[in-house]
Amino acid sequence: MTNEQILRIALEQSARDMNCRPEDFLSDTHVVTRSIANPLARKYLPLPFECDMVSYGNNVVAQTSERLSSTVEDYVSKYWAAHCFETPNIHVLDDMLAPFGLKVCFMAEYFLPDIDVLRALPCDYELRVLTQADFADLYLPEWSNALCRERAALDVLGVGAYDNGRLVGLAGCSADCDTMYQIGVDVLPDYRRRGIAAAVTSRLAIEILARGKVPFYCAAWCNLKSVRNAIKCGFRPAWAELTARDVAFVEQFNRDLKLR
């Protein structure tokens, strides 16, 4: 699979997610579409969205509800693409969303592998390729980034690092759509900074590609450890996404975080 093919697959998936054409992400002008449910979209997306914006760098493609369409069009028309995803402009968006009971919630950067750079990185521990049958006893807090109990049926492949038979690092991937698998990774605190995260992530990415799927990686901009791991493994920034949710959802999400 070439880098061009990987990007095309990602664009096609984003088009399913956003109810638009793949070419819309490469336009020099912003595009606003009506958000609809799509069985081929990434399975964790709670479509339809009131307001969701994606940029591959050229422009913004925004999907909205009918009631938010003109508001979102007004917002994206004001700013260059990158500025739509950063403060202080996001404060403007929050003010525009407030009358609708909405607030900016999730913001993330997504990474795709660079085939010219991606390679299996080494570490000092035994690596094992794991399949779904191996995950049954691993739905524990320490592996909550690599695996998701609520969507266990989507957790299809993993790579574990073992110290004398003890699992100390785990990269897992979820089959979030037909063509792309999302990677998450965890390493036990006492084993960090030993190259384990990069070793299991890079090996898993190669295993995913060998199965004809595209691995992708997601991180918040401020999660520098995760971003560094992505880059070290040969992933490169591909798109950014911003999603608004109900104020009640955002407040509950924040309360839940305080309990962790």
Image (cartoon, rainbow, N blue to C red):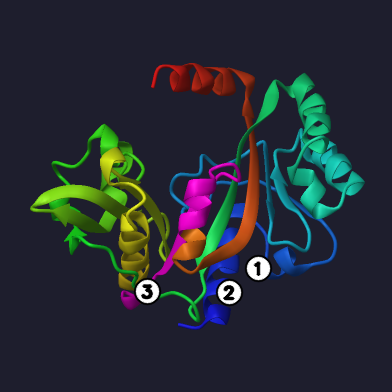
Q: Check disc 3 and give the amino acid type.
A: Leu
x and y, in percent, of residue 47 in the image = 55, 42
Seen at 30% across and 68% down, the residue is: 122
Seen at 22% across and 38% down, the residue is: 139
Q: Earlier in the sequence, mark 2 or mark 3?
A: 2
Depth check, front residue: 153 or 257: 257
Q: Is residue 242 left or right of residue 78?
A: left
Q: Nearer the viewer, mark 1 or mark 3?
A: 3
Q: Is residue 57 left or right of residue 106?
A: right
Q: Nearer the viewer, mark 1 or mark 2?
A: 2
Question: Compared to 26, does 219 lie above or below?
Answer: above
The residue beneath circle 1 is: 22
Q: Is residue 213 magenta?
A: yes
x and y, in percent, of residue 115 in the image = 48, 79
Q: Earlier in the sequence, mark 1 or mark 2?
A: 2
Q: Check disc 2 and give the amino acid type.
A: Arg
Furthest toward the left, the residue is 165
Q: Are marks 2 and 3 in contact (CB under 8 Å)?
A: no
SS category of the residue bearing label 3: helix
SS category of the residue bearing label 2: helix
The residue beneath circle 2 is: 8
Q: Which residues are magenta?
A: 210-229
Q: Are marks 1 and 2 in contact (CB under 8 Å)?
A: yes
The residue beneath circle 3 is: 209
Q: Quadrant of residue 131?
A: bottom left
Seen at 28% across and 33% down, the residue is: 141
Q: Check disc 1 and give the amino acid type.
A: Pro
CA separation in Å, label 1 and label 3: 22 Å
Q: Nearer the viewer, mark 2 or mark 3?
A: 3
